[in-house]
Amino acid sequence: MNNIDQIQKEIIEEFQFLQDWESKYEYIIELGKSLPPMDEQHKIDENLIKGCQSRVWLWGELLPDGKVSYIADSDAIITKGIIALLLRVFNHQTPDDIINADIYFVDKIGLKEHLSPTRANGLVAMIKHIKFFALGLKLKNSEKT
């Protein structure tokens, strides 16, 4: 499994091959379609990310190997693709790596500047929520030991 920095570099390279933002959006939408389905039991208000224009649910757990496994879903196709992109970066990483990650690929590929202001705010909210979730899992795990 690659680390967060390696995954971000891969994403930047992939987006360099896409000619324009129409093809980049199509790619993002395809990523969203590849997300595994989220069990309905996790689509509850408690798992909604606040600050997103669309509804985005995020849930995760700490695996026995000490890494975080996230699942997510959204009711909007672009947003679903964006959360899929973020999960590609953050999934199966340690809570510390997630919390301390510098997420630079968003700026490098120009994603934030090609989103509406409300969607760009939602993107920032998703990153914060993913990191906050990892912090919660870390604290919960430290209480057990």
Image: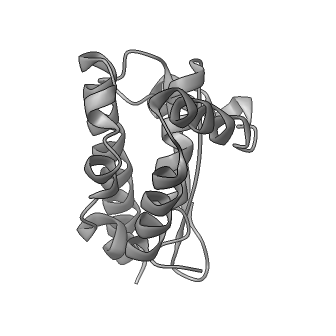
Looking at the picture, tell me which residue is in the foreground, 69 or 26.
26
Q: Quadrant of residue 138?
A: bottom left
Q: Check the picture and name the quadrant holding the N terminus.
A: bottom right
Looking at the picture, tell me which residue is in the foreground, 124 or 70.
124
Looking at the picture, tell me which residue is in the foreground, 18 or 133.
18
Q: Is residue 59 left or right of residue 128?
A: right
- The total of numbered circles placed on residues is 0
Q: Does residue 63 appear anywhere in the picture?
A: yes
Q: Quadrant of residue 141?
A: bottom left
86 shown above or below 11 = above
Q: Quadrant of residue 6?
A: bottom left
Residue 116 position within the rendered picture, expressed as x and y whole percent measured from the top left: 30, 17
Residue 65 position within the rendered picture, expressed as x and y whole percent measured from the top left: 59, 83
Report the colour scheme.
one colour
Q: Residue at x 36, y 39 (%)?
A: 126
Q: Residue at x 56, y 44 (%)?
A: 84
Q: Does residue 90 appear anywhere in the picture?
A: no
Residue 51 position within the rendered picture, expressed as x and y whole percent measured from the top left: 29, 23
28 shown above or below 92 = above
Residue extending furthest toward the front: 19
Q: Check the picture and name the quadrant holding the C terminus.
A: bottom left
Q: Residue at x 61, y 31 (%)?
A: 26
Looking at the picture, tell me which residue is in the foreground, 123 or 40.
123
Residue 143 position within the rendered picture, expressed as x and y whole percent measured from the top left: 35, 73
